[in-house]
Amino acid sequence: MTQIQQLANHHNFCVWSVHQGGAVPFHAENTRPDLANLSTVDKIEWLGNNVLPLLPGNTQGKIGIELHVRKELNAENMQPVMDVLMKHGLHMGMITPGLHHTCAQGGPMSLNKAERGRAADTVKETVDLAYRMQEVWPKDMAPTLVLWNGGHNRLTQGPEIRDQWKLLVEARADLYAYERDAGNRLYHGGESKPNEGHPVLVPQTEPQEMKLVDSAMELAGISESERHRYGLNPETGHLCLVPGLDPAATLAPYLDRIVHFHPNSQGEAPTGSTLGGPGMYDVDHEAKVNPLGITIAYMLRESGFARMFGHDFQPRPSDTSDGLRQAAARSVLAVETCWLVSDPTWGGNWQADRLKALANNDVRKATDILDDVHHEAHRIFREACITAGVGEASRFLSVTP
């Protein structure tokens, strides 16, 4: 019997993961023909029918959806989207303005006034739609408004970046003030990435994003009592793109400011089994069970993280719709496995033993302990996958479904 009987965390699935193929440049365009020309409602219906039944225990109140405005959600389809969410017992866990779809000149940091205006209009529309959809908010927490930097692109090298940073701070402060007047309940998560689609995006890493958040809060006059609602939506896969950057070390100073988390992976090349990571393009794979995932889960648990994990991944270029179905379920099971083994009461408090070893300068022993945890975690994960029907027995590991 699997050790994962019930979801310990809240999870969101991203609508944009569901498509026929070709969402990423140079990928084949029709590897999942049965998912061609689906509306947002159709995609949520597909997730409800094909992925929810694979997850352990009672998922009621635990699973939500992530939506991009205006590409996936707008005033015209808002009610049908709400209807299908309620039909499947889902909620709107995350909402984001899809500025990368509409802003080619820097969005809120553009030196073009009309471009900045379009970006501001989309951001305000996102806030408005979020509050109009309160009926499908999670029952025990407010959704997260995530600001991914896909539309915050630099066009050329030059000192104008100093002026553009100032514009970005002002735009973010305007959003914070607008949302405060609209209801003052949403959580705000900034999501950084070094590049994608453009050579440079801003902010590129979490420290830069945190500086933007805090500067905008100060400019907007956000009180210290509201500080917990303004922070980061880190994406592990984005952090893994930067050569020499340790994702765990980067996140450690900001654990109390994480309001939403995307546990995507790159395969952690060159040691992982999938080809992505530093110096390579964003393969955007589902969450994985590995030492990095276990480390981050442990730090989040110890910091009191009780918000949502978002599964904002891309299926592999060769995946059929069944491959996508498996990836979505396995991503949730991977996070739940990392969370399970990060419990200090699990495995005889293995981290306490690692700290003792490190205090005695026995790095190899500390490494062996984490490797042991990883191997057992992988066994638990495979066991959960077999139970869910999205994995096969290992030829080496002893797995009993």
Image (cartoon, grey):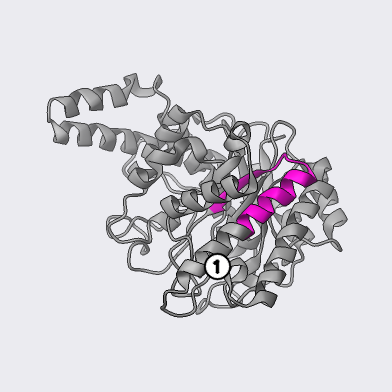
Residue found at x 24% / y 27%: 354
Direction left: furthest residue: 361
Residue found at x 45% / y 37%: 255
Q: Nearer the viewer, residue 148 or 5?
A: 148
Label 1 sits on residue: 152
Task: Work out whether 24 lies above or below 373.
Answer: below
Residue 72 image point, x, y percent: 73, 63
Q: Nearer the viewer, residue 319 or 352?
A: 352
Residue 27 visible in rendering: yes
Task: Work out whether 35 lies above or below 224.
Answer: below
Task: Work out whether 226 lies above or below 100.
Answer: above
Residue 315 visible in rendering: no
Task: Kindly indicate the quadrant of the structure image that contains residue 377.
Answer: top left
Answer left or right for 100 relative to 60: left
Q: Nearer the viewer, residue 267 or 69?
A: 69
Q: Which residues are magenta?
A: 171-190
Alpha-carbon neighbours of circle 1 within 10 Å: few (<14), some, or many (≥20)? Answer: many
The number of numbered badges drawn on the structure is 1
Residue 374 image point, x, y percent: 33, 38
Residue found at x 60% / y 77%: 104
Task: Work out whether 192 lies above or below 7.
Answer: below
Q: Secondary structure at mark 1?
A: loop
